Every structure is written in C-alpha cells, then in structure tokens.
Amino acid sequence: MQLRSHLAQLPDLDIEWHYQSEVPGHGEHRHWLGKPISTPQFVADLSARTGFLPGSTKPVKDLVQRLDADLYWIVAHYAGICVAAELLSMGKPVHLTVHDEPLAMIIRSRRFRPLWPLMSLIFPRVLREARSVDVTSTRMRDYFKAKYGVNCFALYKYLPELPVVHSRLSTDTLTVGHIGSLYHPEPFRRFVLACRSYAATQNRSLKIIRIGNSPDMDKIASENIATFENHRELLEQEALPVLATCDFVYAMYPEGLRFRGFRRTSLPIKLSTYIQAQRPIFAHTPSDSGLAQLISKYRVGTVCSSQSESDIQQAVRTILDGKTNRQNFEAIRADLMGPRQLQELRRALERPLKSSFVPN
C-alpha cells in the first residue's frame, strides 16, 4: 500500500511485480514465483552467506535466475534480504525499501531471534551495497546514517490532500477506533479497562470499533463481547466513515528493550488512515518512539507512556478535552506524505527504468 501510493504517481515506470505466496494472486504484471522460502531454507541461506554455519543458497539463487530487469526493487524483510544479497553478488542494481528495521524485527520476533547474529552480518552489507535506499521514517534515516554511514530518504506514503470527513459522535457512548494488529496485548487490555472506568464516570457506555484481523485483539474482544464492534478488512476509503464515528483512535508501541529499536525507527501504517480520518490519536507508547514524536510535534492527539489505569484515564480526559484541528492534520500530511517524498523517489530511480519488485 505504501509503495503503490507513490508508484501510481510515476506512470512512466515499467514495473513487473514478482512475488511469493502460498497461492497465486491476481493482477496485471504480477508474476507468482511459488511458495515462500521456508524457515530452514532462510536459515541455510543466511548461514551460507555469512560462513557462520554450513548451509545452501540454492533456493534463492534459483529464484533470482527467474528475474530479468534493469533495476531490482526489493523490500528488506526477512527472505527479501537474501534475494537482495544474491542480486548484489551478481552485480545487479538494487533499490532497497525498508519498512521495518530488520535487526529490530528479529529481536522482537520469538521465532527468528536466534538469527540475529547472521542477519547482523548480512543486512549492513546489503544496505551499503544497494544503489539507493528508502526507509519508512526520518528516525530510521538518521539511524542508518549514524550507524552504517548510508544515505537514505524517508518514504512513508503519498497522499495529495486530506479528504473531507464529517464526524458523527455520540454523546452517550465513548467510541474508540483501532485498525489492524496489536504489537502486545497487555497495554491494550489495560487501556480497555481504563476507558470503561472513565466512561462510567461520565454515564457513558464504551464501544471499541476494530477494523481488520488480529489474534491478540480477538482474545481481548472475546473477553469484552458487548464492548467491541467488529469490522472485516476494509479498504481505506471504507474505513474513514467508520472511524469518523470515533471520539479518538488508538495506536501502540510497547515498552521494553525487545521493542526499543522497533518503536524508535518504525511508524505504523495505520497512522496514515488515522491522519485521513482526522480523529485525535491516542498514542500508547513510550516517549522515545517515533510515533510519540510525531503526535506531540503536530499536536494531533495525546501520548500516554503509562500502563496504570489512573494515568490512562487522565490521558483519555486530556484527548477528549482537546479540539481536533484540521490544520494540524494537514501539516503532518504535508510533511509525512507530501510531494517532497515523491520527488526524492524519482531522483533515487534517476531515469525511467524497467524495474522488478520482489515482496515477501
């Protein structure tokens, strides 16, 4: 979704989409490469490229041999990093997109955490050898420059203008919106309890509107059946009128060392939808996160770094007492999703190219 919002503005690019998934998808210029690389194959490829352990690069080599393009556009996510490494070893030009810093993702993943020593050798090499790199936030851009000496540019999502949204708020119900998954269930569980208590003091009921799928959210919703209003996966334009009924919307990055690198450099994609909905954003996150920095800088919501019920209630009171200002949302749109990023992408690609993008 992030890349497509920019590429729609660059019609002169001839793009062939190569992807892996369990079953083929549909769409013009889309080429199914088969099922995803398995975890054992991923581990073997990383170990072979680092010399850390015996292993094999054959599955990735076979995959790359099926690609033919002038420029290879790779999303740096798990096995995609192996694909980029193989292309670079062949002298192919690679443009790298980093949505989530891979080493931070490995640290927070219980499944892949043992691969950190291998990835810490491969990823910096790929980052330095890529012809150009875009990253999801200015925080990540600055981090890569300081740690690896690599010049990147921030590329979040392109949005030419804010939509016109008409809010329809209830005076009898405290309504909170949330999109997608939870990074950790416990902070949100405490948030729900605090909101219920606060709503009771105001003689209001609590309703939480959830959009999309999340196993952690499923469990919390099952504990509070009467509170949750469940929606399926919605297109962004379908989600906006639903969020317009919310007093505010919720986003989270957890505390703790395991999530520190992730929250400092990443931005949740749900933020782009929240900005378009122009509802105040309750950022439940430590103050060192990129999310907290943006919410505070542009005054589009409230940051709460605590998990205590009383502190959360005070933050809810603060966000409800504030006023939604379209100008503030317009300012964050212009800086985060404006034409400047699009221009940087075009400069990075340098010239009209036939390019291949290999997602995971």
Image (cartoon, helix red, strand yellow):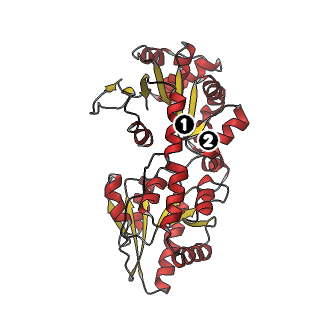
Closer to the camera in the image, 341 or 95: 341
Q: Is residue 325 above or below residue 19?
A: below
Q: Which residue is mark 1?
A: 344
* Secondary structure found at label 2: helix
**Residue at image point 53% right, 23% down:** 94
Badge 1 amino acid: Glu
Q: Which residue is mark 2?
A: 104
Comparing marks 1 and 2, which lies closer to the viewer?
1
Considering depth in this image, is 103 or 318 the residue closer to the camera? 318
Q: Is residue 299 left or right of residue 355?
A: right
| Image side of residue 306 versus residue 75, left or right | right
Viewer can see residue 218: yes
**214 horizontally vs 126: left or right:** left
Q: CA distance from mark 1 to mark 2?
A: 25 Å
Drawn side of residue 109 relative to residue 69, left or right: right
Crowding around mark 1 (Cα neighbors within 10 Å: few <14, some 14 to 19, many 20+) is some
Q: Residue 255: x, y in percent?
A: 63, 56
Quadrant assignment for the N terminus = top left
Q: Position of residue 150 (x, y in %)?
A: 67, 31
Q: Earlier in the sequence, mark 1 or mark 2?
A: 2
- Badge 2 crowding class, 10 Å Cα cut-off, few under 14, some 14 to 19, many 20 or more, is many
